[in-house]
Image (cartoon, coloured by chain):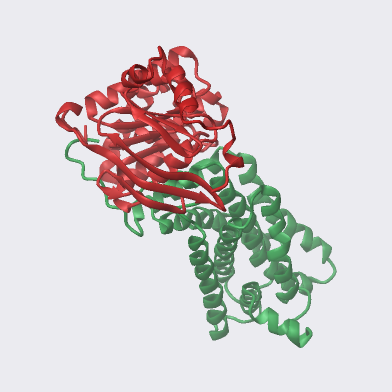
Amino acid sequence: MTATATPARPTAFSAARTLATAARVLRQLRHDPRTIALLLLVPCVMITLLRYVFDGSPGTFDAIGASLLGIFPLITMFLVTSIATLRERTSGTLERLLALPLGKADLIAGYALAFGALAVVQSALATALSVWLLGLDVTGSPWLLLLVAVLDALLGTALGLFVSAFAASEFQAVQFMPAVIFPQLLLCGLFTPRPNMHPVLEAVSNVLPMSYAVDAMNEVLTRPGVTGTFVRDLAIVAGSAVLVLVLGAATLRRRTT
Amino acid sequence: MMNKKPPPDDAPGAAVTATALTVTRGSRTVLDDLHFTVETGQVTGLLGPSGCGKTTLMRALAGTQAKVTGTLDVLGHPAGDPRLRHCIGYVTQAPSVYDDLTVRQNLAYFAAVLDPGRRATARRVEAVTRALADVDLTSHADALAGQLSGGQRSRVSLAVALLGAPDLLVLDEPTVGLDPVLRRDLWNLFHRLAAEHGTTLLVSSHVMDEAERCHRLLLMREGRVLAEDTPEALRARTHRPTVEEAFLHLVDAAGHPATTPEERTP
């Protein structure tokens, strides 16, 4: 540094530090091309598989395919984020960063930005493939499908970040996937419409964010244009993501024993 | 250089002052009522056997240790104050760098956290280049940190701490696993930082021969400070030829039974 340099004050949020963090996370991923390939290709392969599993009933493919386009990014981003943050905690780099003038919001937003960008690419590939090549029949705009998918990815990132605080090892972090994601998967309306469930389960599904992710996808599937229900569902998914991100920030402690 | 200060002789005073510093972990007292100072612009060695509380003491200084009681002033602020995050370089014993980034990418990221923004780009490049040269890793700048040897990775970790030209460097066993030539080079670097930039260094080690290279020493045992003096004064006071023998003499004189810290009751 030169004599004219005045060090930037530590602030709660700094756009430059957030962008630097996002760039760093993406740079780490770039050294791991196999993970990138898996992230981008697996959803495409799964959706193709699904198309031919329901070869005889295109209507079923439309319903489940649209929901899965929202669920894939949520699950993959959950896994990637929980492992990435856990590594940050165990390698000592998190402690180092928190001893530096980095806001917790900078770190969280940096991760959300990096994985959000990745989710845009992942969702764009899977959505484009479904709509143009596999004949997924949506009434609404495919762009709305993409929008929901990206918000779902953000929710997955938020959940992954949050649960990584409770995992002491990679083994535990991976086990949080069935614990946190599977109940939502069962209750989100993918297997049967939510009103057909036992009333208790329906009530539970009403407070789980993935239900609204799937509802939003179904809105796009069955209705043209942006409906009020669609906007409400989107707001709930986005609101849940932000809430969980804030909870995730609260699990980052500058002082530890 | 930023933080240019007059030589140590003109700037007496303590960079760190601890009064009744106590740290507990669970029901165990890890640091027990410590009183000591670390003088500005000097290399202070923190010595003692493994498990005596050196790392906890350093974490308390860096503001990452929870359950700290007593008074701990660092550079005029209480330890852990947000204003100190620019002024302290803390290097943990295990290197804390990103294994899946190159050495230069590691340094560039931490530099961007310390000195963010597009306008600071040139300044950051200069800081990274200098830190690489300081730890003699320029030739490995584009290697992945995870593919380096243990000693090289710990030097990357040290280079990160040098980036912001901090006023206080807290180094936890920085020379473990290094060959004699590198150890000598690093100690020369520590003394150069103290002499040229007035940097205060607190360097821990459990190798007593490194004690002779320090201006002052803090000898610790079982969570307490056994002695706080210059190596010469310690040797003279105890009539022993080396710091190691002086340390052993002090342990015997204190009448400590040879217990491990785990066996102590708080």
The residue drawn where x is 54% and y is 75% is: A234
Depicted A6 relative to depicted B149: above or below: below
Does residue B41 appear to the left or right of A214 in the view shown?
left
Q: How many marks?
A: 0
The residue drawn where x is 61% and y is 74% is: A209
Depicted A222 relative to depicted A38: above or below: below
Q: Position of residue A242 (x, y in %)?
A: 50, 68
The residue drawn where x is 59% and y is 35% is: B260
Location of residue B165 (image quadrant): top left
Q: Position of residue B203 (x, y in %)?
A: 40, 29
Q: Position of residue B144 (x, y in %)?
A: 52, 30
Does residue B79 appear to the left or right of B57 in the view shown?
left
B122 vs A62, nearest the viewer: B122
Q: Position of residue A156 (x, y in %)?
A: 60, 62
Q: Is residue B213 something one can see in this rendering?
A: yes
Depicted B50 relative to depicted A163: above or below: above
Q: Chain letter for red?
A: B
Quadrant housing the N terminus of chain B? top left
For chain A, what colour was chosen? green
Location of residue B160 (image quadrant): top left
A39 vs B145, nearest the viewer: B145
Q: Is residue B165 something one can see in this rendering?
A: no
Residue sitting at the far right:
A56
